[in-house]
Amino acid sequence: MKLSCPNCGAIYEVPENAIGATGRKIRCRACDTSWFEPGRAAPAAAAESPVPPVSSPPAPAPIAPVTPPTTLAPPVAKPKARRGRGPWLLLALVILVVILGGIAATVLMGTQQVASRLGIAEDRVPLGIAITREPDWRMIAGGSQLFAVSGRVWNPTTVEQSVPDIRAELRNAQGKTIYAWTITRPAARLAPGAAVNFDGAAVDVPANSTNVSVSFVGTGVDHQK
């Protein structure tokens, strides 16, 4: 049979004959509360065997409470293993070496040379260019007309510079380009303060051209004549 403490509600499982017909005093082991539990009627099979009268209620016997069900704690999540930082550290070192190498190369060779070595074209070439003579119109064999232009390229910087090819353009009175061609660079590189002359010519150019300009290929800086 089951007994319940009137104070804390603890439940106890006791044998059917532990209380007896006259009842007995019970003490809760959980909260130490005592109460009198009335007797229970004996089963029919046991009615033929009278229970001898009890002269006085026995002393309350402590009864162990029913062990409550064990509550399982939620599983503790294991911390994720940290990924190795070795590859990232190696990558950072490689990037640092590349940056330091670029800075050193720029200091030693100059930005123009570094860009040239890496194949990077700059928007502005630190060289000077100018037409040094009036353009020349000539008739050549076969009746074709030859247009010739001459000029000069110089290096005003303190470091050696790469020389790009030269673009020559003929423009009409409205400033519109009507003919253009490329003049091969007169030198691959120019030392600091050095200069070099160039000549270029085109055949059968439009007759309505009024002026000519020269510039380095890939830049917008030019010189007109």
Image (spheres, rainbow, N blue to C red):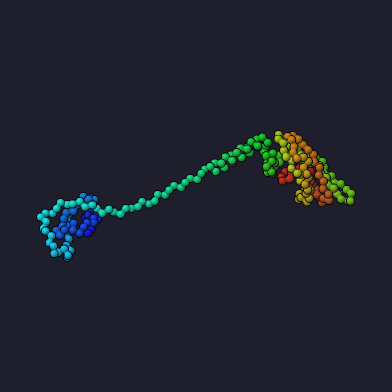
Near-viewer residue (177 or 123): 123
Give me the residue at 70% from left, 35% from top: 159
Q: Write down the quadrant of residue 136 in the picture.
A: top right
Near-viewer residue (112 or 178): 112
Near-viewer residue (205 or 72): 72
The x, y position of residue 186, in whole percent, is: 78, 41
Q: Write down the quadrant of residue 188 in the picture.
A: top right
In the rendered image, which quarter contains the C terminus?
Answer: top right
Whether residue 136 is visible, yes or no, is yes
Near-viewer residue (133 or 77): 77
Above-or-below relation of 119 to 63: above
The x, y position of residue 85, in whole percent, is: 52, 43
Left or right: residue 166 versus residue 109 is right
In the rendered image, which quarter contains the N terminus?
Answer: bottom left
| Residue lying farthest to the bottom in this orientation | 44
Give me the residue at 18% from left, 58% from top: 17
Whether residue 213 is visible, yes or no, is no
Left or right: residue 105 versus residue 137 is left
The x, y position of residue 125, in whole percent, is: 71, 41
Give me the residue at 57% from left, 42% from top: 91
Give me the residue at 14% from left, 53% from top: 58
Total marks shown come to 0
Left or right: residue 67 versus residue 197 is left
The x, y position of residue 123, in whole percent, is: 69, 44
